[in-house]
Image (spheres, rainbow, N blue to C red):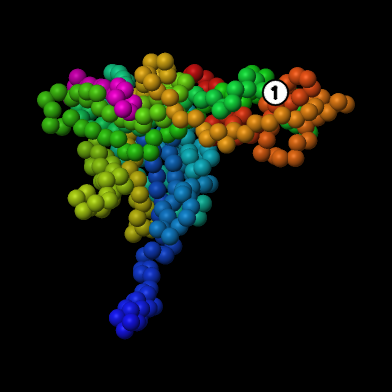
Amino acid sequence: MLKWICLYFVLCCWFSCRQNYEPPEIKAPNRYLVADGVINTKPDSRTTFQLSRTKNIVDTFVVSPETGAQVRIEASSGRVYALSEQTGGFYSADHLSLSPSNTYKVRIRTTDGSEYLSDIVSPKQTPAIDSLSWKQDEDLTIYVSAHDPSGNARYYRWDYTETWQYHSFLETNYGLGVRNGQMYFLDQTTQIYNCWTTQNSTDIIMSNTVRLTDDIVDHFPIAIIPKNSPKPDIRYSILARQYALTEEAYNYWDILRKNSQTMGTLFDAQPGQLTGNLHSVSHPSEPVLGYVSACNVEEKRLFIANTELFNWVSPPPPHAACQEGEISQDPNNSFLWNYPDTSFSPWHFVSPAGIKIAKTDCLDCRRRGGTNQKPSFW
């Protein structure tokens, strides 16, 4: 009995003495500028930069976009190209034809009057993507191949945009909609059975050919789709973008990749000092995150139909999630909709004088995050 009393006393003392360790750096109101983008020197192309602010460990928001800024590209020829603000901290300019023989720098002015300037960068020539290919084992892997006969590229980075088509869990054809308590028939532009989701890559994907005799990238994996993911259920598309980097830019992205993607065990790379080529003109000691590069961005698109895959079927939703029912039509107004449970929607008419209903989440494909408007390239 005495042993248990002593143990209880020790535990009480232990927990009463524990305090959270919260160094000042964790709560410091540091909001450093982050600039992400590439000056695209491909003729008649778009250049986009994303501006945001760093966050602290204790912050709960995901991204802090920097809005209301002025962003412009300054060429050695003396020309200035202003980028227009979009949403979410994005700034872009379309149909630019920037000469690869010029050098460039980016100037940013934020709403508080602070000014930021990048180092002068010389454009690199990005070779074309030779091919995008895929292989299905347990997972579906997308590969990129490219080569530079001149041997000048050597350092490569890729990102991509995925788009995939999917259906609502319950077939609706065009289906029924509700407006102001009245049902109406949907048409091809308002249907809720076919949807498309678009998603940008988030990983840092890099490779180099420095140790190779020839500047050739052969079947380098850039994306892996887990077995039975819903992405290729009907038709899947990936638009890959290829960037040629300078050695300095490659080293920057490599440190960022190691800091953000490979840490977690004692054997992973330790955090490295991240130094970009953007600087604060207004406050020289203020850190600025990001690396401005210039190159012609090369793109290639690949489509994969579900019929090309072997036994690829994503699991259906739980049966309870797609509850169904049937109600009677109002004899005075067959299109009246006043069902009290707002989680249900009309599905289709049944005879005699009935309406089949189901959970809206299973009828409307948009509830899964996509849009019912077909992409222009589809």
Judge whether 7 appears above or below 136 on screen. Answer: below
The location of residue 375, given as percent across then percent down, is: 52, 22
The location of residue 319, given as percent across then percent down, is: 55, 33
Q: Secondary structure at mark 1?
A: strand
- Which residue extends farthest top? 307
Which residue lies at the image location 38% right of the left edge and 70% below the top edge? 20
Please indicate, yes or no, whether residue 157 appears anywhere in the rendered image. yes
Judge whether 342 appears above or below 196 on screen. Answer: below
* 208 horizontally vs 337: left or right: left
- Which residue extends farthest front? 1
The residue lying toward the viewer, choosing from 208 and 110, is 208
Q: Which residues are magenta?
A: 135-151
Q: Quadrant of residue 168?
A: top right
The residue lying toward the viewer, choosing from 146 and 150, is 146
Q: Would you name the residue on which mark 1 appears?
A: 348
The residue lying toward the viewer, choosing from 88 and 85, is 88
The location of residue 247, given as percent across then percent down, is: 21, 38
- Which residue extends farthest right? 332
Locate the N terminus and report the quarter of the image it occupies: bottom left
* 240 horizontally vs 69: left or right: left
The location of residue 241, given as percent across then percent down, is: 35, 28
Q: Quadrant of residue 210?
A: top left
Which residue lies at the image location 22% right of the left edge and 25% below the top edge? 217
Which residue lies at the image location 49% right of the left edge and 18% below the top edge? 378
* 119 horizontally vs 150: left or right: right
Q: Identify residue type, mark 1.
A: His
Q: Magenta stretch: residue 145 in it?
A: yes
Which residue lies at the image location 42% right of the left edge and 65% below the top edge? 27
**Number of disc labels:** 1
Dot 1 crowding, Cα within 10 Å, few <14, some 14–19, many 20+: some
Please indicate, yes or no, whether residue 346 appears anywhere in the rendered image. no
